[in-house]
Amino acid sequence: MTKNEPEQQAHERPVRERLSAGETWRALYRYFRPHRAAVALGALCTLIGAATGLAQPLAAKALVDRLGSDESIGGIILLLTALVVLGTAIESVGAYVLERTAESVVLAARRTLIGRLLRLRLPEVERTQPGDLMSRITSDTTLLRAVTTQSVVSAVAGGLSFIATIVMMGLMDVVLLGVTLGVIVLIGGAVALVMPKIAKATERAQEAVGTISTALERAFGAFRTLKASGAEERETATVQAAAREAWRHGVRSAKWQAVAWSSVGFAVQVSFLAVLGIGGARVASGAISVSTLVAFLLFLFYLIDPVSRLVEGVSQYQVGSAAIARIVRAERLETEDVAGSAEQAGRQGPAAVRFEDVTFRYREGLPYVHHGVSFDIPGPGMTAFVGPSGAGKTTLFGLIERFYDATGGRVLVDGRGVHEWPLAQLRSAIGYVEQDAPVLAGTLRENLLFGAPGATDEEIREVLVRARLDALVERLPDGLQTLVGHRGSQLSGGERQRVAIARALLRKPRLLLLDEATSQLDAVNELALRDVVAEVSREVTVLVVAHRLSTVTLADRIVVMDAGRVRASGTHEELVAADPLYGELAATQFLATGEDGMIRPGR
Ligand code: ADP
């Protein structure tokens, strides 16, 4: 983070942090390194192609020389043709090798990023914009294409022919070379000042592209709300503003690139004038001959090509460095280690869960959500967590799944701290049903198999019956192959909830975390699911964040939470008698969806 960035952006640090020139170079080199040989081959082909081009005038000269004599010219014509064909072939091979390498660099960058982004820790994701992260994979990586290949080749080829031409000029006249270099250094210095501006403008343009993705993601993520709120025009304006911003910075980058490019011609023209003036004087004084001056001027024009290549190489490097900065910052976000076997390591039977004086806050600077939570759930059965909204019930599940790390105290599963578990193993023991029951785009079958890709058809059938989804599947013309739409939008809320439960059960969890929906199930299904959960809880440890009296009365134990603390625990009868808050909740909140099966608004 730069020193003068505003305070409130501090939490975005790794996403906005500037890269030093050395870091940028090393990051680019990391992608370039595996392709050194291919780039060298491409460069070689390009040079050979250019050289065969140079050989043609020589062959033509030989041809003209023989025209007067009786010697056959067939051989030379053949040679010329062969040269043209060979030169073209080699050049196109070179171009292909370079383009292919460039695509491989893009692929490598994308693979690395994709591999990391889906393993990011939750707190990292929460403080970034997913749309922006996505644009780093799709858009920024493509900017690497040119920098690692063409830019290198341009710089190397340009550098080599620059040196060769300079040497030739030095052989002609050192004084005139001095004049030429003097002009080039002056104008080159000015161009060097412009170069970082290209990088900066490109980075701003890419940030704006990220903003486009972010804004679109926000709109599509709440598309119904967007329509219902009549927000189409405003959101369109937001996205268009971001697009305009990308345009503005893109144009700015183009402007600086144009300045850099045109200054090459300018430098040569100025050198030409200077050489003409000073060279003329030297010819007059007899220091050099006229032919030397002419030859020198010709070389001066040969210089345009290598200098343009050098400038091109450097300006492409600027564009690439803008992209690499955004890519590296995304790569630096903290990931989880979910590698390793998800096998449950031979452990069978219900899991035990224990919280020991757990304190937790989501981020530094935010208030504590848990102030020393302790409870012990040794074995199977259903435990209901109840309490006012915001008491920290859902957060408990995030700590058990280790989406977040407790700030203090210990969270234990099977007597072992969640930190000591290999993450994949810990999570494979758990089935988690979130409150908003996410369903992914795709088929019903894919959704069910999401957490248990190896489940058999028989197991799927069983779980469908358990989650009361069998009737629904039978009714659908495509059955399990039915597409459920973006976020399952073609399913009802209750159906989504049951799909989520079926998915969790298919994992054969030893611990089921169920964040009960507040008001999504109809009465029949609610009672049916209650039976399912009760049935499951005979073999599996079930933790429910409960919003219904029907769930709570079935629970083997109830933990009452209030403002980040455990306030009381016991059975329904015990708590009604002993805890006034629970009595109040039972009388008001839970009764909202009472035993009569009527659905009324929850909390
Ligand atoms: P409950 O489930 O009891 O309603 P939660 O555990 O969902 O309560 O939330 C407890 C507190 O933590 C709330 O004040 C909520 O605003 C806050 N909170 C929840 N999730 C996050 C998050 N991802 N980042 C920051 N604060 C959060």
Image: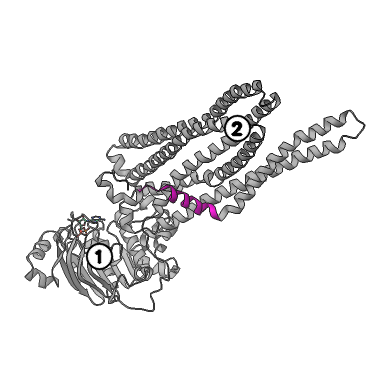
User: Is 539 within the magenta?
Assistant: no
Mark 1 CB lies closer than 8 A to ligand 1: no
Instruction: Return the x and y of residue 51 as percentages of the image width and height.
Output: 70, 40
Mark 2 CB lies closer than 8 A to ligand 1: no
Give the camera-side residue of 145 and 528.
145
Residue 68 vs 142, above or below: the answer is: above
Magenta region, main secondary structure: helix
Q: Quadrant of residue 505?
A: bottom left
x 59%, y 44%: residue: 156
- SS of the residue under disc 2: helix
Amino acid type of the residue that numbered disc 2 sits on in the rendered structure? Leu
x 29%, y 69%: residue: 512
Start and end of the magenta stretch?
A: 17-33
x 39%, y 51%: residue: 329
Give the camera-side residue of 312 and 525.
312
Amino acid type of the residue that numbered disc 1 sits on in the rendered structure? Ala
Q: Nearer the viewer, mark 1 or mark 2?
A: 2
Instruction: Return the x and y of residue 136 as percentages of the image width and height.
Output: 42, 47
Question: Residue pushed farthest right?
Answer: 70
Q: Quadrant of the C terminus?
A: bottom left
Which label sits on residue 177? Answer: 2
